[in-house]
Amino acid sequence: MNTVSVIPQKAAPAPANKRKKSALKRSETLAGFLFVSPMLIGVTVLVLIPILATFALSFADWNFIMGLRGFKWAGAANFVKLLDDDVFKRSIINNMLFLLVVPVYMLVSLILAVIIDHFVYWKSFFKVAYFMPYISNIVAVAVVWQVLFQPSYGPINSFLQAIGIKHPPGWIADPNFALVSLMMITVWISIGFNMVVYIAGLQSIPKDLYEAADIDGASTWTKFTRITVPLLSPTSFFLLVTGIIYSFKAFDLVAVLTQGGPINSTTLMVWDLYYTAFRDLKIGYASSMGVVLFLFVFAITGIQWIVQKKWVDY
């Protein structure tokens, strides 16, 4: 006689349990939103709304002194006007040249990080020493370099004259060297932060890779190019993206040292935007500059994100 085994069926959850789980999930979601609400409110008020307002004002002819009654739509007139604005075109060229500081201070920072991490005692002292310019007040830094670059009695030109250079450059007073001077100061300020990040990246590389390379007889250069550089590529990508964005935001050194001069040789896009908005009181026109600046940063960051798949090893 065949016996039929009966498999006990799992009891369906009671509706009361479903309601309890749903209520618990809603309360957890609400608690999560309450915890992040200060950040969400801050980002919305200080970032999202100004970005949307900038896009809207870029199509208007308006300044805040006229009030809302003076608001007039101008269509694409502001952007057409930008095409004939020689100062704005010069600021774009200066910004493109200013981007060169990023690979320079990344390379210097990487070399210093390798030296300090592998060959130097008192690592903490050197980390602090190189990091100090990055956390120093930018106005104080600018004043110090203003004295160093002084054309007549500054220490730099005095040294150049002492080694036989009869006509040293005028640095920030010379249209041909003013932008180069700002780039040198930016490199000096940025080395500390990039170096500390690179040292953290170096210390995360497994030591057994170098030990295996030593057993195989690899030279120092081979270990640097085949192990260190590829495994630091995510760190380099992070520093490259943030460095380029920072270079487009450069404003403080220009404001303190040169104010765009001499002869607009140091006018960068953010300085031109600030001058147009708060000196000439052309808010709509300045907003169109802000939109162009946003598009530049967005496009360059997008290109970097696409190209990084070919050289970044995760």
Image: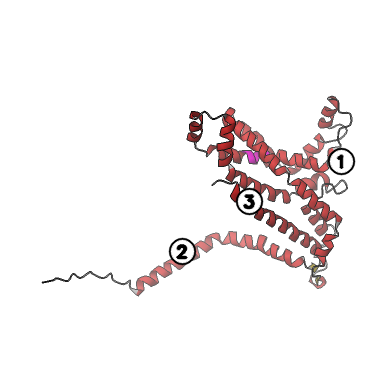
Q: Is residue 185 above or below residue 68?
A: above
Question: What is the secondary structure assignment of the residue under circle 2?
Answer: helix
Which of 177 and 224 lies nearest the eye of the viewer? 224
Instruction: Give the number of the disc on residue 173.
Output: 1
Residue 239: percent from left, percent from top: 63, 45
Check disc 2 and report the residue beneath it: 28
Q: Which residue is at 26% across, 70% downward? A: 9
Q: Is residue 202 above or below residue 266?
A: above
Q: Residue furthest top?
A: 163
Residue 226: percent from left, percent from top: 56, 37
Relative to residue 241, is residue 74 drawn left or right? right
Q: Residue furthest bottom?
A: 15
Q: Residues within 10 Å of mark 2 (few under 14, many from 20)?
A: few
Q: Residues within 10 Å of mark 3 (few under 14, many from 20)?
A: few
Residue 312: percent from left, percent from top: 58, 46
Q: CA distance from mark 3 to mark 1?
A: 39 Å
Question: What is the secondary structure assignment of the residue under circle 1?
Answer: helix
Q: CA distance from mark 2 to mark 1?
A: 61 Å
Q: Earlier in the sequence, mark 3 or mark 2?
A: 2
Which of 292 and 144 lies nearest the eye of the viewer? 292
Dominant SS of magenta comes to helix
The magenta stretch is 191-195
Check disc 3 and report the residue beneath it: 307
Question: What is the secondary structure assignment of the residue under circle 3?
Answer: helix
Q: Which residue is at 58% across, 60% downward? A: 38
Residue 196 counted in the magenta span: no
Quarter the N terminus occupies: bottom left
